[in-house]
Amino acid sequence: MTLNPRMEDLLRRIEEPIRNRFSGRSPRELYEPMAYLLEAGGKRIRPLLLVLSCQSTGGSVDSCLDAAVAVELLHTFTLVHDDIMDRDGLRRGRPTVHVRWDEATAILAGDGLVTAAYESLIRTSHPNAALAIRRFTDSLTDLCEGQALDKLFESRPSVTPDEYLDMIEKKTGRLIEASCGIGALLGGGSEGETARLERFGAGLGRAFQIQDDLLDVAADGGQLGKPLCSDIVAGKKTFLTVHFASRADQGMKKRLESFRGKKGWTAADTAEVRGLLASAGSFDAARRAVAESTEQALEALDRVRPSRSREDLRELALSLVERVS
């Protein structure tokens, strides 16, 4: 993901308090696992969206930095617990928290990250701070609902496209949407501006997750930071598999299902999965959905007051949905 110098400067402002959040705190057995994924890096998409949304409505970095740290801590909590539930072994190119330590430690680290997120958020001093906390809390509720649906869908023989979209809008989209909305609130944006930035975030979140679904199968494995086709092996419902199930014949469906739980994944397996999905038009459908959701996001953004930060939001959105890892 390539960013212009202005956004690179913002990322440096955001990165320092995130990386130093637990520096010197004890007991080490709690705070080292909490800091582990934060120290591994990441795109910092949500805090960057929050800060740019704040600036685009007239606010400053100082007025929203604690909230920006909070959304990254909350996002990291979801990764720690999601990895436990999915039995994933890699995250950001390193062993996951429950693999590096154990499940009990990872559960506690996730709980600690939620607490730390609220600690950071309530430091925010702004007339709209209470509204920001409410948005933040609502997004956490939706995140949990989305994760519950994601797990439920693994055991369901079929899921409709609308059910899939509802799930990703809660699990992935809601925190991206909330990041934009919280930023607008802390920038002093009007009710209309806040709503438009939230619609921008909602469209971007949908496009971002569908692009993630694509990358799970189509990316260069060396850039992905986790095994290729891990969603296929786990039996997860993704945009690709939901679309495939609506188009493929029974023989094709059975063949794709045969890869669920497969050990010793090979390049030939990847090639066959890609061939099956391509034959049903699932790659093309996913790319169209990414383009449509991105267009909807940018249409909402166009109705926000013109500013350099608004253009940075546009550039960031396009960079995210065109990424290759």
Image (cartoon, rainbow, N blue to C red):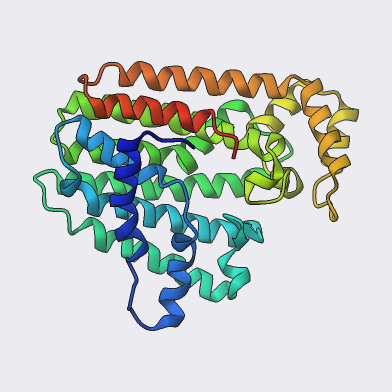
Q: Is residue 39 visible?
A: yes
Q: Quadrant of residue 76?
A: bottom left
* Residue occupying the far left of the picture: 127
Front-lying residue, 183 or 87: 183
* Residue 92, position as x, y percentages in the image: 57, 54
* Residue 104, position as x, y percentages in the image: 54, 75
- In the rendered view, tell whether residue 319 sits above or below residue 127: above
For image coordinates 81% across by 21% down, the residue present is: 279
For image coordinates 39% across by 49% down, the residue present is: 141
Q: Quadrant of residue 113?
A: bottom left
Q: Left or right? Give the position of 1 relative to 74.
A: right
Front-lying residue, 74 or 156: 74
- If the image is split into quadrants, where does the C terminus sit? top right
* Residue occupying the far right of the picture: 251
* Residue 54, position as x, y percentages in the image: 22, 37
Q: Quadrant of residue 318?
A: top left
